[in-house]
Image (cartoon, rainbow, N blue to C red):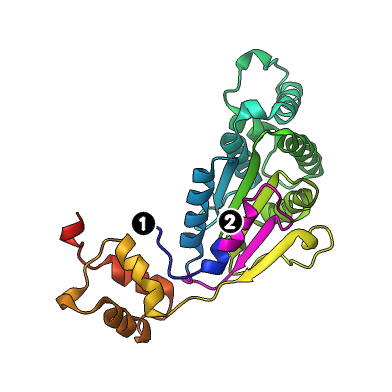
């Protein structure tokens, strides 16, 4: 499935600037309502970052999945690769060894999620907070020393558990302000307050305004390889589509286009 977008040219330019080696605004907040195309836009950004090749990409989608802080830390470890996180993994092993009274140094790098689960129980306790703080400090030290920069891409932020939102707001975004090797793209119907004193100076808030212009949707028809019915003029067809009240947001327009037959000439 293609990730063609109807417009969002400014947003893509902001993301391209985010990938630059010298980047002052390292946090990009994309705020928009349901169906405006946030997920598709993030998919385009993620694809571009992977083609760029200079970033460890950490995509996290909170839509329909109750990812807790354990899932968050584990997915970061998987994306960045555990062998690049010497301090973080050492702290995991040390705490786990003292917890279960076994020596794990001979176990290579297998089962870190299980170890995290042991040392970071789900109940909200003071001990959990202390362990999480220690893990966070070690992780941020490792991220700072990586040869490649790290790009976090968060989708549907408003659906994230409160503990995850707190971690992103209090730890990750604050570290981004101090570490030029970290970049964050965060999208949601609600996003963190960009005016916060800790990291607001390196943040850009971009409200998403969907396009209902026929010319902006023409590349989507091409990218998805769809055939306009009855040999209609593509722009006229899209103009009628965009002005139809039944297609009240980009998601409904795109879904209709995806339902059109494939263009056989291009298969």
Examine the rendering and report whether any part of residue 252 can be seen. Answer: no
Q: Is residue 68 above or below residue 200?
A: above
**Which mark sits nearer the N-terminus, 2 or 1?**
1
Question: Are dots 2 and 1 in contact, CB under 8 Å?
Answer: no
Q: Is residue 264 above or below residue 31?
A: above
Examine the rendering and report whether any part of residue 187 can be seen. Answer: yes
Mark 2 or 1, closer to the camera: 2
- Tell me where residue 50 appears, x and y as whole percent: 51, 44
Q: Which residue is mark 1?
A: 2
Question: Could you tell me which secondary element the residue under label 2 belongs to?
Answer: helix
> How busy is the neighbourhood of tag 1: few (under 14 within 10 Å), some, or many (20 plus)?
few
Question: Could you tell me which secondary element the residue under label 1 belongs to?
Answer: loop
Q: What separation in Å lies between label 2 and label 1 (alpha carbons)?
A: 20 Å
79 left or right of 125 in image: left
Q: Which residue is mark 2?
A: 16
Q: Residue at x 69, y 57 (%)?
A: 27
Q: Residue at x 73, y 36 (%)?
A: 139
- Nearest the viewer among 146 and 246 is 146
Query: Is residue 219 inside the magenta stretch?
Result: no
- Tell me where residue 52 appears, x and y as whole percent: 53, 44
Q: Is residue 7 above or below residue 56?
A: below
Q: Residue at x 54, y 40 (%)?
A: 53
Where does the magenta region start and end? 13-36
Q: Residue at x 70, y 15 (%)?
A: 103
> How busy is the neighbourhood of tag 2: few (under 14 within 10 Å), some, or many (20 plus)?
some
- Nearest the viewer among 219 and 174 is 219
Q: Quadrant of residue 188?
A: bottom right
């Amino acid at each position: 499935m293609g990730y063609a977008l109807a417009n969002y040219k400014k947003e893509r330019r902001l993301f391209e600037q985010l990938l630059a080696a010298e980047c002052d605004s390292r946090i990009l907040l994309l705020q928009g309502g349901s169906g405006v195309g946030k997920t598709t836009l993030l998919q385009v950004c993620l694809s571009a970052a992977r083609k760029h090749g200079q970033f460890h990409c950490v995509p996290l989608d909170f839509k329909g999945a109750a990812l807790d802080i354990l899932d968050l830390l584990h997915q970061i470890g998987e994306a960045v690769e555990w062998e690049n996180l010497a301090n973080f993994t050492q702290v995991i092993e040390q705490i786990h060894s003292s917890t279960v009274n076994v020596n794990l140094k001979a176990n290579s790098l297998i089962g870190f999620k299980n170890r995290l689960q042991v040392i970071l129980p789900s109940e909200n306790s003071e001990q959990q907070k202390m362990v999480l703080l220690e893990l966070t400090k070690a992780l941020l030290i490792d991220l700072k020393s990586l040869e490649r920069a790290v790009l976090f891409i968060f989708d549907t932020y408003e659906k994230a558990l409160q503990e995850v939102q707190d971690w992103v707001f209090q730890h990750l975004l604050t570290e981004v302000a101090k570490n030029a090797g970290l970049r964050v793209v965060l999208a949601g119907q609600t996003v963190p307050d960009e005016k916060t004193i800790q990291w607001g100076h390196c943040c850009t808030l971009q409200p998403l305004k969907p396009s209902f212009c026929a010319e902006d949707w023409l590349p989507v028809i091409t990218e998805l390889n769809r055939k306009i019915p009855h040999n209609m003029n593509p722009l006229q067809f899209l103009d009628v589509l965009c002005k139809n009240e039944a297609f009240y947001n980009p998601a409904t327009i795109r879904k209709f286009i995806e339902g059109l037959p494939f263009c056989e000439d291009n298969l």
